[in-house]
Amino acid sequence: VIDKGQPEHSVITTCAYCGVGCSFKAEMKGEEVIRMVPYKGGKANQGHSCVKGRFAFGYATHKDRITEPMIRDSIDQPWREVSWEEAIAFSADKIKGIQAKYGRDSVGGITSSRCTNEETYLVQKLIRAAFGNNNTDTCARVCHSPTGYGLKATIGESAGTQTFESVMKSDVIMVIGANPTDAHPVFASLLRKRLRQGAELIVVDPRSIDLLNTAHISANHHLALRPGTNVAMINAIAHVVISEGLEDKQFIENRTDEYNAWREFILDDINSPEAMAEITTVDAEEIRKAARIFAKAKNGAIYYGLGVTEHSQGSTMVMGIANLALATGNIGREGVGINPLRGQNNVQGSCDMGSFPQELPGYQHVSDNALRAKFEKSWGVTLDNEPGFRIPNMFDAAIEGTFKAMYVQGEDILQSDPNTQHVQAALSSLECLIVQDIFLNETAMYAHVFLPGSSFLEKDGTFTNAERRINRVRKVMKPLAKYADWEVTQMLSNALGYPMNYQHPSEIMDEIASLVPTFSRVNYKKLDEQGSIQWPCNDEFPDGSPIMHVEHFPIGNGRFAITPYLGSEDRANRRFPLLLTTGRILSQYNVGAQTRRTANQSWHQEDLLEIHPNDADERGIKDGDWLGITSRAGDTVLRAKVSDRMKNGVVFTTFHHPISGANVITTDSSDWATNCPEYKVTAVQVEKVSSP
Ligand code: SF4
């Protein structure tokens, strides 16, 4: 790190990496950020940070930034730099022409969990009001869409129930399919602090995560299950709780519905630890022990990540988690709750802002006439009452020839969506692909228009973190490409004939507050005064809501859901005997577009395949060997890392580098309710090869 001396001024803003949402003081010399200092007044981080937020901001001014709009008539032509006016007019003409030829529903767009709430709101508004359909989806489709479905069905709100600080009152902490030390480092430090104070830890994960090695903790329990068997595990835990009479009878009586039907289902022998031990490969006694510890805790909290959602039964598992929390009365006070650890900085926000094809902002369904009428009055248009395409539907329709144009803001769908070959086929079928990003990403190979994006340092707005905390993002430098992303969306909308005339993102937030009941008292003045606000923030909770569901659920009572276990589609067999699962490491971030353009790159230069020593021995594999990995979808090559962190029969890799292309081998299997891809279960064969 180079010491750049004393700052001339500083600006408080929010980290744009993970869902913890740490506040930082951007220390400036002129227009240059010389240091990012974790801000003590930040309520999510209280002065702490990790190596990404603190050191990996240099990508914002990296030489690879694209600062001029570019267009081309076909993807085999070279890019041509043009003025903003020409790029916007070109894009609008293409969309109008395609809709005239193929119909209103032949176009759509994808919002980004990397962008601000205000930008996400504008993109979905552009699609609904200017495109005239509901073909809007978000990159949250591929991470936490099952959280939205599962929590809405059981507790009535698609959001985590607690503050991060709440964990300091937990006695037993169950972490399922999450690796906070790498993916949510600042929250992991808080969690470790509580573990050192005496809280017990239960980890449900096929891999031995670092949290299990926390020094000086009283007890930990690792249920190292086979990938794809989460629902079997949560049902077995619930079976023990109910069959041994460990449930919270008063909470069930006063605060829940549908209990008797669920009780009958869960007590079936099929859900017993003995039956589920065979499926999960975890000893029945271990399951019983963990279930008893959780149920007997004064305060039991559940934290989960993509190891829950990115499964063909992702939504079922989220409902299974809610069942357990309801049955044990662990909702509605500090130290308990259901806590999805959101991956990207604004996953919660992009879902809240109406990015999904079936829901207007605030999870208000498009088919509800009264709710739709409210938006129609405010926006001055007639809205479609049918849900539009999800991302996988857009890909399928593009290949079939009925979907012809797509506007993608801030997501590299080619690299981050599963089954790369299928995505390539879809993108190459489009007549117009408009990509808005800060770098010429992999998706842009198939684009006809490239609109330069703006980084978090170049705009005003808000992000909403995993604890529903709305944090201010403040502009510290002028946009390198002249406009912030929200301004570009606004220009495109105007060119399409639907007028937008916002002067500042605060006006967009005022509009959101007028339409979304859980945001009705949110505004920039209050955000500046309070520092941040946890929604719901409305007449009932004017200062926001650190803990949700204290006295009632938005749906009245919590609802138990029937959650039968079904095996993953992609199963190991003789041809593909190992199960691949994927995840992140601390210094890198998602597809690496940002962190690979910072000093963090020196800590992690390639994706490796972690393999258990027994599986490695069987194949004559040693550390550093090149490995060919083949699945039903495709094949790739990675270097080996032999590690006893892995369960026998399970291999693991990260997805931070395009060259390895982990998604070349992931399949089309997806969650039954939301189409969230099953990234966490891919049957593969692994063999030593001589070179890549
Ligand atoms: Fe940024 Fe997350 Fe690290 Fe905080 S924990 S500094 S939000 S990456």
Image (cartoon, rainbow, N blue to C red):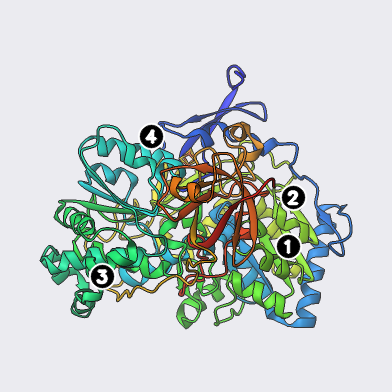
Identify the residue position indicated by label 4 in the image: 46
Q: Crowding near pointer 1: few (<14 within 10 Å), some, many (20+)?
A: many
- Expressed as whole percent of the image width and height from the top left, the position of residue 295 reads 17, 57
**Assess mark 4: CB under 8 A from ligand 1?**
no
Identify the residue position indicated by label 2 in the image: 440
Q: Crowding near pointer 3: few (<14 within 10 Å), some, many (20+)?
A: some
Residue 554, can we see it? no
Q: Secondary structure at mark 2?
A: loop
- State which tag comes first along the sequence, 2 or 3: 3
* Left or right side of 65 for 291: left
Q: Identify the residue shown where x is 69% and y is 47%.
A: 692
Instruction: Verify CB contact (< 8 Å) between mark 4 and mark 2.
Output: no
Instruction: Verify CB contact (< 8 Å) between mark 3 and mark 4.
Output: no
Q: Secondary structure at mark 4?
A: loop
Q: Tell me the kind of residue under disc 2.
A: Leu
Q: Crowding near pointer 2: few (<14 within 10 Å), some, many (20+)?
A: some
Identify the residue position indicated by label 3 in the image: 275
Q: Tell me the kind of residue under disc 1.
A: Leu
- State which tag comes first along the sequence, 4 or 2: 4
Q: Identify the residue shown where x is 38% and y is 51%.
A: 467
In this rendering, the label closer to the viewer, 4 or 2: 2
Identify which residue, 49 or 536, lies in the foreground: 49
Tell me the CA gap for discs 3 and 4. 45 Å
Q: Secondary structure at mark 1?
A: helix
Snapshot quadrant of residue 165: top left
Tell me the CA gap for discs 2 and 3. 51 Å
In this rendering, the label closer to the viewer, 1 or 3: 3
- State which tag comes first along the sequence, 1 or 4: 4
**Assess mark 1: CB under 8 A from ligand 1?**
no
Identify the residue position indicated by label 1 in the image: 492
